[in-house]
Image (cartoon, grey):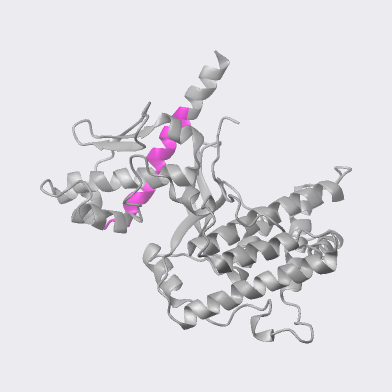
Amino acid sequence: MKNVQVLECLERRILHGLSCEWDAALWAFNTELRKQMCKPLFVLRDFKTRLGYWSSEKREIGLSRQFVLNHSWNDIREVLLHEMAHQFVSEVSNAHQESAHGRSFQHACRMLNANPRATGTYIPLSRQIFQASECESDKTRLRIQKLMALAQSSNIFEAEAAMIKAHELMAKYEIEQIVQNTPREYFSVFVGKPALRHFREDYSLALLLMDYYFVKGIWVGAYVVEKGKTGRVLEISGTSRNLRIAGYVFDFIRQFIESEWQRYNAGGKLNRYRKTDFASGILSGFRMKLEQESPPGRDVSFSFSPVPVYDTRLKQYTEMRYPRVRTFLRKGGRCHSGVASDGTEIGKTLVIRKGISQPACDVPSRYLE
């Protein structure tokens, strides 16, 4: 009985979240178009072969119960926006003579940043990216993965050398792609989970990914199922290869911080603010490591330093996705210099190790676990 009540409560929060996400997505349209969009009913159904639907007769958007209970909010929102695009075609465009995924639907998807393929037996985009199988033609990625495997070595010098070479290879490949103006496809996915509050180290880690792993990041609004309120989450944009790498690095560093903090604060005497000082110190130390000068004999043009070549296509993609972006400054609180310094020294020893092809980010997130 208790499990049934928990499940019912969870489903109510999810339905409320769908409503909140619909309200937020509505602002993708201008004032006149918003007036023509009426808020639908939201329901969960026991589908076996589809993820969701829009019903113009019932004026409702339905999602698969099994899908929403076993996937991340990123995936759920992806399907919701797809169905919202169908609603737009039905209520605003009135394109009844077009096919279900015709020109008007594609136009609505572009306005909503919706995935036109997120229906039926479709595999959510985040799972496609982070669970992609190895491809023999992707020789560069395989070489990077092998170098990351070498970084697993117990020999710290061998591990660091492998990580350095892997980063150099990433930088070299990106520079070549940008200089040669190679056509590339960009995607956007969440990393981490939506939360009502993010700490200083979360923003530092976001900047680290943008500075060294060839992705763009933006904090976007997203519903926090566990809290029943709207919070924020980091969304990164880039090529599928770079999203996989950046997503893995994100998870690896967060797990490293957590394990080192448990060891450092074994007595449990330090509070959450000191954990932020410690985590920020680790990220600072790792950044110092990335910024170190190349040793003699290494090709300095592909060192750890931020790559000077700018990916204008990625910039254009993110500007089209989010034409209105607001920046804000956060005041730093008091910092315990001793704890931060200890974290910095530990950060200088951090080596990103084996596992670069494994799923990262918020996929999947089962809320009942």
Q: Is residue 171 above or below residue 353?
A: below
Which residue occupies 53% across, 66% down? 215
- Name, please, the residue furthest toward the front: 136
Rendered image quadrant of residue 205: bottom right
Q: Nearer the viewer, residue 271 or 22?
A: 22
Look at 68% across and 54% down and name the residue there. Answer: 252
Q: State the residue in front, 360 or 316.
A: 360
Label the magenta part by its dominant secondary structure.
helix
- Residue at the (36%, 46%) spot, across then down: 118
Horizontal side of residue 308 vs 102, given as left or right:
right
* Residue 228 on the magenta span: no
The quadrant of the rendering that contains the N terminus is: top right
Q: Residue at x 51, y 37 (%)?
A: 225
Camera sees residue 145: yes
Q: Position of residue 126 (x, y in %)?
A: 48, 50
x and y percentages locating residue 236 in the rendered image: 51, 60
**Residue interval drawn in magenta:** 11-30
Give left or right: position of 46 versus 35: right
Q: Is residue 223 above or below residue 219?
A: above
* Quarter of the C terminus within the rendering: top right
Q: Is residue 266 left or right of residue 13?
A: right
Q: Residue furthest left?
A: 97
Dividing the picture into quadrants, the one containing residue 68 is: top left
Residue 42 is left or right of residue 13, and the answer is: left
Query: Magenta stretch: residue 23 in it?
Result: yes
Residue 331 in view in this figure = no
Q: Residue 54 in the image: state x and y as whole percent.
A: 26, 38
Q: Position of residue 185 (x, y in %)?
A: 41, 65
